[in-house]
Image (spheres, helix red, strand yellow):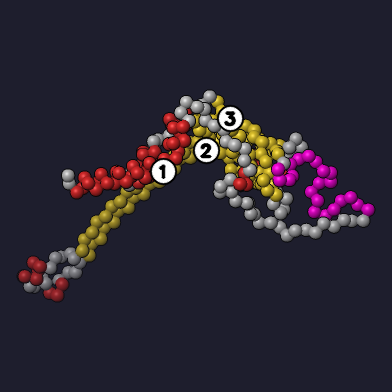
């Protein structure tokens, strides 16, 4: 066996080992769930999930509350009467996800360039009168020609739409009164789970009287809609193919 084939075999074995290590736990879990419906996620505190980080945004200077004589209004207040809309950590509000995106873009760029360089010295050091020098020294010392052409085209045609409602929980109240919300919804149909995740920052003033808010009014919005189950597994490439797609340069 040639050295090249041995190195190739070792590389293939190493890639297989890496794939096995990376997918070992996942494969064991999937094998243990053969013939069973995918399990729903447990209801957990979003702030205790791995990777959770409190939101930090630029805040105005705090205002000291002051009351005017014989007045029920105080400075810095956003409302005169207290309402039942979400305002504290743990409160629930409904987010109306209404996402419609449509884009059509077409671009074309053309570029062409041609250049010619021709330089030389006539009768260099009297080369015309010397027979041998005339044979050695050329009439032109440098002659270059170059030509380049480029034609690039690109187009994008995208259309997406998502309309649904999801209840979210207030996980944090920022110093200026804005609310950090996060909602997660899971629906299991047969052997497939569809999950919707919505998170972002909302203003209490944008919450409607029925305790709902449109997704277009959520700052730093994070909306994820996907699924997991048998159909999703079939649509995904195998682990080995994913590893090869990442490592192979061609």
Q: Position of residue 140 (x, y in %)?
A: 18, 64
Q: Nearer the viewer, residue 119 or 193?
A: 193
Tag 3 and tag 2, C-beta contact below 8 Å: no
Task: Residue 142: name its quadrant.
Answer: bottom left
Q: Which mark is residue 187?
A: 3
Indicate which disc, 3 or 2, sits on the residue closer to the N terminus: 2
Distance of mark 3 from mark 1, alpha carbons? 28 Å
In percent of the image, x 59 and y 38: which residue is there? 197
Q: Main secondary structure of the magenta part?
A: loop
- Residue 67 vertical placement versus 241 (above, below): below
Of all residues, the one furthest to the right in this rendering is 70
Residue at which label 2 appears: 103
In percent of the image, x 19 and y 49: which residue is there? 3
> Magenta region: which residues?
70-90
Indicate which disc, 1 or 2, sits on the residue closer to the N terminus: 1
Q: Nearer the viewer, residue 79 or 244?
A: 244
Residue at which label 1 appears: 22
- Residue 188 vertical placement versus 126 (above, below): above
Pick the quarter of the image with the N terminus.
top left
């Amino acid at each position: 066996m040639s050295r090249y084939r041995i190195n190739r075999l070792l590389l293939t074995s190493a890639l297989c080992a890496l794939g096995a290590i990376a997918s070992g736990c996942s494969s064991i879990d999937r094998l243990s769930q053969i013939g069973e419906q995918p399990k729903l996620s447990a209801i957990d505190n979003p702030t205790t999930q791995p990777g959770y980080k409190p939101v930090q945004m630029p805040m105005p200077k705090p205002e000291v509350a002051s009351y005017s004589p014989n007045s029920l209004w105080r400075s810095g207040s956003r409302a005169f009467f207290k309402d039942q809309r979400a305002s504290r950590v743990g409160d629930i509000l409904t987010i109306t996800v209404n996402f419609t995106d449509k884009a059509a873009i077409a671009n074309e760029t053309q570029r062409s360039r041609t250049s010619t360089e021709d330089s030389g010295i006539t009768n260099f050091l009297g080369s015309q009168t010397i027979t041998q020098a005339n044979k050695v020294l050329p009439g032109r010392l440098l002659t270059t020609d170059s030509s380049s052409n480029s034609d690039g085209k690109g187009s994008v045609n995208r259309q997406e739409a998502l309309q649904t409602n999801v209840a979210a929980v207030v996980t944090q109240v920022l110093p200026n009164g804005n609310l950090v919300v996060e909602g997660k919804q899971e629906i299991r149909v047969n052997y497939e789970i569809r999950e919707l995740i919505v998170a972002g920052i909302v203003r209490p003033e944008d919450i409607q009287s029925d305790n709902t808010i449109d997704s277009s009014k959520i700052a730093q919005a994070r909306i994820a809609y996907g699924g997991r189950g048998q159909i999703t597994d079939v649509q995904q490439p195998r682990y080995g193919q994913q590893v090869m797609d990442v490592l192979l340069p061609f």
